[in-house]
Image (tube, rainbow, N blue to C red):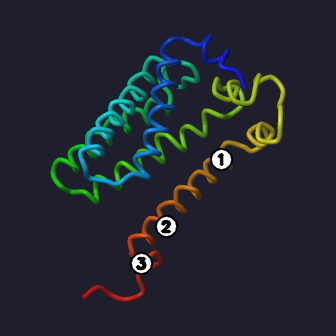
Amino acid sequence: MSLAPLLSASPAIQVHALAAIAAFGLGLAMLARRKGGWAHRLLGRLWVGLMAATALSSFAISSHTAWGGWSPIHGLSALTLAALVYAVAMARAGRIRAHRTAMVSLFAGALVISGGFTLMPGRIMHAVIFGTSEGVHGPIAAAFAVVPLWGWILLAAAAFGTVRLGLARERGRPVGPRLTRRA
């Protein structure tokens, strides 16, 4: 593991990575903490700021572009910004369930799943964690090199579904198809 690839990257990539890593760590801590108090509100504002910095800084990154300087990742960044506005609006309106769903979905989609894609060979974070992207070093790096992109998408969807199922069970909600009619 070496920070050299990240330190030699553009300032936009450095800001993006730092904000994303900080948002990931703070997000994990917030998921484990008690919700609703002053500390939750304060840390939540910090998390929203870090997520906004992550999304906004991505617009200054133009590698892996598909359409005139834009890529699907930029679409995810725009969606992230809209979801942040929605989640904060739901909290302010007292719609806590919608707020919680939006924030957990943001954490899973914008940080965990898309963060996993940064570990693909040829990406800077792959080089930071696994070493040079030329050649494959170690079993985890080998897995990233041989599994096609659609395999990682299916794995991410399965992980997201498992988390959602666990949250539903924790809240006592039915998790299978509804077999009876609503009255």
Residue 108 % position (x, y): 48, 48
- Circle 1 SS class: helix
User: Which residue is painted at 51% across and 60% down in the image?
Assistant: 163
The Cα–Cα distance between marks 1 and 2, rounded to whole angstroms, is 20 Å
Above or below, 19 relative to 43:
above
Q: Dot 1 corresponds to which residue?
A: 152
Q: Of 74 and 107, which appears nearest the observer?
A: 107
Give the mark nearer the N terminus: 1 vs 3.
Answer: 1
Identity of the amino acid at label 2?
Leu
The tally of labels here is: 3
Rounded to the nearest angstrom, the CA distance separating label 2 from label 3 is: 9 Å
Check disc 2 and report the residue beneath it.
Answer: 165
Could you tell whether 180 is left or right of 24 in the image?
Answer: left
Describe the element under mark 2 as helix, strand or loop. Answer: helix
- Residue at x 39% of width, y 33% of height: 51
User: Among all residues in the image, which is located at the extreme left?
Assistant: 93
Amino acid type at image mark 3: Pro
Residue 178 percent coordinates (x, y): 41, 82
Q: Amino acid at mark 1?
A: Trp
Instruction: Indicate which label's residue lies in the foreground, 1 or 3.
Output: 3
Q: Position of residue 74 (x, y in %)?
A: 45, 29
Other-residue count near label 3 (Cα within 10 Å), few / some / many at <14 / 14–19 / ≥20? few
Which one is closest to the eye, mark 1 or mark 2?
Answer: 2
Residue 119 position in % (x across, y down): 65, 34
Residue 174, labelled with which disc? 3
